Amino acid sequence: MSKFSQFHFLLKLAVCLLLLVLAYPFVTYLFGLPYTSPWKYVMMAFFLPVYSITFMPILTLLKVADYKSELLFITKDASKNYDIHFGSLFDCILSGLFSSKRGGFKDLMLYFLVDGMLKIIQDVEGGKIEKEAEIRGSSYFFNTKTAAKFGFESIQLKWSHKYILYLNYLEMLLVFSFSKGRFAHPNIEDFISVKTTGAQLMEHKVYIETLHKILKSKVNV
């Protein structure tokens, strides 16, 4: 589960209310600007990072986002399939991802990814997630080679998903640069989506468990 999920309910509620109050002036000013104003489009670049920090705690509180590790959560659609999401900027800050106290950035990020995948497999084994359920992700945190090792197959990224990635570019730029250990910009045009099923994921449990043990020895969790 996420760090925020471990807070007392009243503390979680207080944090949500505080973040809403802090974000209110920015959001109202942004949507109050006319479409002819260049500042509206400059501020739009910061909207999703602000949204990520402000509203992800609320989605966590409402249990819309089901966290499987500190930085990996899933959401369920109307077809009872699942989308995998890497944690928000708010989660990255709480988890200490940008600090060196818990280990190297890339090792820690991969650990939380693998830890979350292992929890998903356990949910499939326990019947919480159906074996036939489709599980989808983005190459934002997967590349094709790594995805195949987890049992995922590559599919073309939908235009609507690509549009959201462009809107969230600043947050991705920060995380991507930290993962590389230098300033680096992600090329969204090269991104792909990946998908698997609960059953296919289970078939790769041994590899995921082995990788989990290796990564756990490298980080402070």
Image (spheres, grey):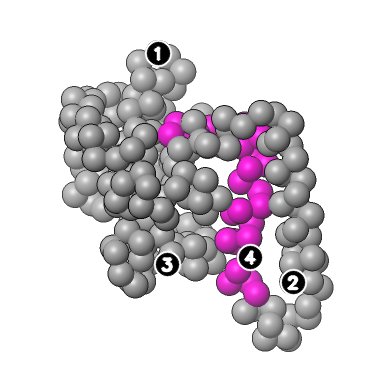
State the image coordinates of residue 133 (x, y, percent, origin top left): 41, 28
Residue 139 place in picture, x, y as percent: 34, 53
The type of residue carrying mark 4 is: Phe
Q: For residue 126, which numbered disc appears in the image?
A: 1
Q: In the image shown, does 161 or 149 lie closer to the viewer?
A: 149
Disc on the earlier residue, 3 or 1: 1
Which callout, 2 or 4, points at the residue further toward the start of the chain?
2
Cα–Cα span, label 3 and label 1: 37 Å
Residue 11 visible (yes or no): yes
Query: Split into 4 quadrants, where in the image is the C terminus?
Result: top left
Q: Mark 2 belongs to which amino acid?
A: Leu
Q: Are marks 4 and 3 in contact (CB under 8 Å)?
A: no
**Mark 4 / mark 3, whichever is N-terminal:** 4
Residue at coordinates 67% horizontally, 41% vertically from top-left?
Answer: 58
The part of the image, by quadrant, that contains residue 162 is: bottom left
Question: Can residue 91 be spotted in the picture?
Answer: no
Q: Which residue is mark 4?
A: 47
The residues bearing labels 4 and 3 have C-alpha atoms spaced at a distance of 15 Å
Q: Mark 3 — residue? A: 173
Identified at 36% across, 20% down, the residue is 122
Q: Residue at x 70, y 43 (%)?
A: 15
The three-letter amino acid code for the residue at tag 1 is Gly
Circles 1 and 2 in contact, beta carbons < 8 Å: no
> Mark 2 sits on what residue?
30
Q: Nearer the viewer, mark 2 or mark 3?
A: 3
- Residue 201 at x, y percent in the picture: 28, 29
